Image: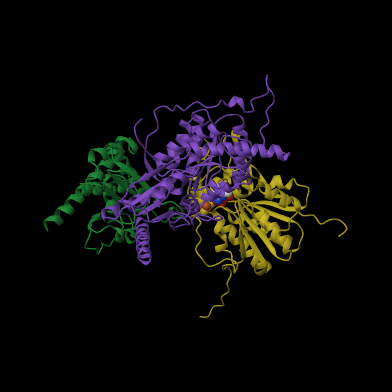
Chain colours: A purple, B yellow, C green
Amino acid sequence: MAKVLMKGNEAIAEAALRAGAEGYFCYPITPQTEVAEYLSKRMPEVGGMFLQGESELAVANMLFGAASTGKRVFTTSSSPGISLMQEAISYMAGAELPVVIINIMRGGPGLGGILPAQSDYFQAVKGGGHGDYRTLVLAPSTVQEAVDLTMLCFYLAQKYRNPVMMIGDGMIGQMMEAVEFPESYEEPPLPPPDEWAATGAKGRKARIIKSLFLDPVSLENNVLILEKKYQQMIREEVRCESYKISAKNKVLIVAYGTTARICQTVIDELEADGVSVGLFRPISLYPFPEKEILKEATRKNIKSVLTIEMSMAQMMEDVERAIQGRRPVHFYGRTGGIVPTPEEVKEQVLKVLSVKRRSTKKKS
Amino acid sequence: MAVDSKTVFDRPVTLRDVVTHYCPGCTHGVIHRLVAETLDELGLRERTCGVAPVGCSVLCYNYFDTDFMEAPHGRAPALATGFKRMRPDMIVFTYQGDGDLASIGMGEIVHAANRGEKFTTIFINNAVYGMTGGQMAPTTLPGQITTTCPAGRDVNHTGEPIRIAELLAALATPGYIERVAVHTPAHILKAKKAIRKAFTLQRDNKCYTLVEVLSTCPTNWGNTPGEAIEWLDENMIKYFPLGCYKDYVEPEGK
Amino acid sequence: MMHQYEVTFAGFGGQGIMTAGQLLAYAGIEEDKQVAWIPSYGPEMRGGTAYCTVVISDIPIGSPIISNPQCACVFNRPSFDKFTPLVKAGGLAIVNSSLIDVTTDRTDIDEILVPANEIAMKAGNAKAANVAVLGAFIGATGIVSFDTIKRVIKEKMARKKSVLEINYHALDEGRKLALKTLGKKARG
Ligand SMILES: Cc1ncc(C[n+]2csc(CCOP(=O)(O)OP(=O)(O)O)c2C)c(N)n1
Ligand code: SF4
Ligand SMILES: [Mg+2]
């Protein structure tokens, strides 16, 4: 298929259809409402279900019901709406339901603003609801990647029977880029839903889709079953990318999503000035590419690591954990809907470079 | 020649002298004025706390010169309940749109009304989600086109519009519930009377009070301010008949 | 040798700002370039200034945040005040002189005055003002070819022949003005 120019939100909607989504439940909220508006037209065309619910609270629980049928279902929202969904996400993780939840993040806390942010990092990767559970979290940095990852989300949700999230900042939802949809979508084989979904107890034992285990031993067992899946995710689902990482780098930048793109521009500009910097971009935020970061950050030539976010040092905690104190980790971020400019990021890189130079002098 | 001059019309003290962000032809502003006049006339401004919704009127605290809280989407009645229970001597009102009150906040409003919470709700029914750009609301009329029902609202898919005044009036708990409109001077006068009655009942610690106001949204209805008034008159009032749905009755023996 | 080009279109809602940017972005794709169209979104959109930035590049596009574009096409006075100071030195400002009665005092950028509203009216439809400016932009920079932009206008915007003619006319008037302005400059 030829390349088409599409807004991120619409591309995500179309990608979900291509991945075989049969049901979509939503509640309007800026900056992702275009997904709902797009699907209000397209879903009926492809014979799928489009329903605007009365709240995100209801929508997330509609998703619970819809996923229990074994069909492919998803929702999209933005930060305050995603907060309302947390209870259901916890229940769906406990009940092992495959659902896709996409958060086009805006600035918070509270009503906050509507401009791009990455401030829901903790909420997404640490599990915003209660209990011992995880959601698999992916973060695109271009509209094309939003398409690819949306489709991947559906596969991973089925593969693990677990809620899968994609988080993109408002920029990813609002900007238009050229995208290409795969000609035909063929996914690897998956366990068929009729092994677990509530399809009617004809000729088999009744199935209960639930998260209640009053007996602590069976609850612990259930959590351990979940935990096994998370360990498998850590082994199989780490995704990341590097940009201009080389033996000449002195500083390693870690950034994801739109922020990573800004860092790429900075790296190109610095390269032209003779300053070599590399970028490590996590694509999966849970599982976090810990080993991979550790390896890149502890190369001999790397003196320090700089985490850049559109949030207040949230991902930095995971970067620090990965690096285990073996390199200093610096942070620079903007928040509240302000997207850092390449100029200010560049200044931070130069600052980190000079701080390090001074400290080496002191030692010698 | 000296002329005795008398001010016959002025800005209510409770309304700040600022430019609002509302679109041309939007009646949110008229409703603000009626609430402000009422608080002036009853002398309640200094002991009032409003609760702002999430919707076009989220910034109404910039226009009312009273204390205010900003609630999460739909939760204003819960905040109002908490506040009024701790400070029954104060006057509390929520100002909520139809998405805010009749969709996401349906649980809170029903229970607040049913508990007979002694605050006032000004409910703005404009048949659409204004702030987010014109999506379907629970009050969207059958066949009405919005950005999330591009083929017109199909009642087989999303049900009939919700009539909030009728619905809440069905509760057994005493209360005062009236539906008004503000698209003509005559309607504005009636609306003012209803709003004044609601705040008076609250001041006298009588009952839960709600005034539903049919309001225009030319921006998202896709028409001019003048056409919006006609559209409201011709379509909304038919579906949402004006009038008092529940009046407060003094308990016997008082 | 073009590497990456950035242009901001700015004006108030209803002036076809977003559309002008999208037409250019489509044309970029047609010519196998990398493109990004980045809108302003948010409260500004209701009544205030609306703007979008288009990045056209030979290589994958990094930052979608462009602080200093090579060109600003400004359609009203507030946009003129906000965006012409941001243009990169050596860059270009295209100014809708129908609504903006001042010119930049910057000497390090080129300026093309396009009476876009008048051109559009003369062409037959006031709505074509954005296309007149687009014509001037493409005429001045050659970022995409006129054949491509004409094809895009036909496919994405003006299927009706009469509307198409109006837009082509506005496009061409813009182009001629740009060539004349820059040509004069080069000679003088
Ligand atoms: C939890 C949550 N969900 C969604 C939103 C987005 N949102 C903001 S205003 C609004 C609808 C407002 O519509 P309405 O209450 O009818 O007020 P109007 O703007 O029409 O006056 C929505 C859905 C939000 N802010 N928070
Ligand atoms: S969008 Fe509608 S409700 Fe909101 S201010 Fe404009 S006209 Fe009023
Ligand atoms: Mg409304």
Query: How many tags in the picture?
Result: 0
* Nearer to the camera, A323 or C27: A323
Q: Is residue C63 above or below residue A98?
A: below
Q: Is residue B62 left or right of residue A275?
A: right
Q: Quadrant of the C terminus of chain A?
A: bottom left
Residue B224 % position (x, y)? 47, 49
- Going 62% across and 42% down the picture, which residue do you hit? A90
Residue A327 in which image quadrant: bottom left
**Most distant residue in the bottom direction:** B2
**Most distant residue in the front direction:** A364
**Most distant residue in the top direction:** A203
Residue A195 % position (x, y)? 61, 25
Q: Is residue B160 visible?
A: no
**Most distant residue in the left direction:** C187
* Nearer to the camera, A73 or B3: A73
Residue C127 % position (x, y)? 33, 46
Q: Is residue A337 above or below residue B17?
A: above
Residue A144 in which image quadrant: top left
* Nearer to the camera, A281 or B61: A281
Q: Is residue A181 left or right of residue B63?
A: left
Q: Is residue B127 above or below residue B116?
A: above
Residue B226 % position (x, y)? 50, 50
Residue C110 in which image quadrant: bottom left
* Nearer to the camera, B60 or B4: B60
Q: Is residue B137 visible?
A: yes
Q: Quadrant of the N terminus of chain A?
A: top left
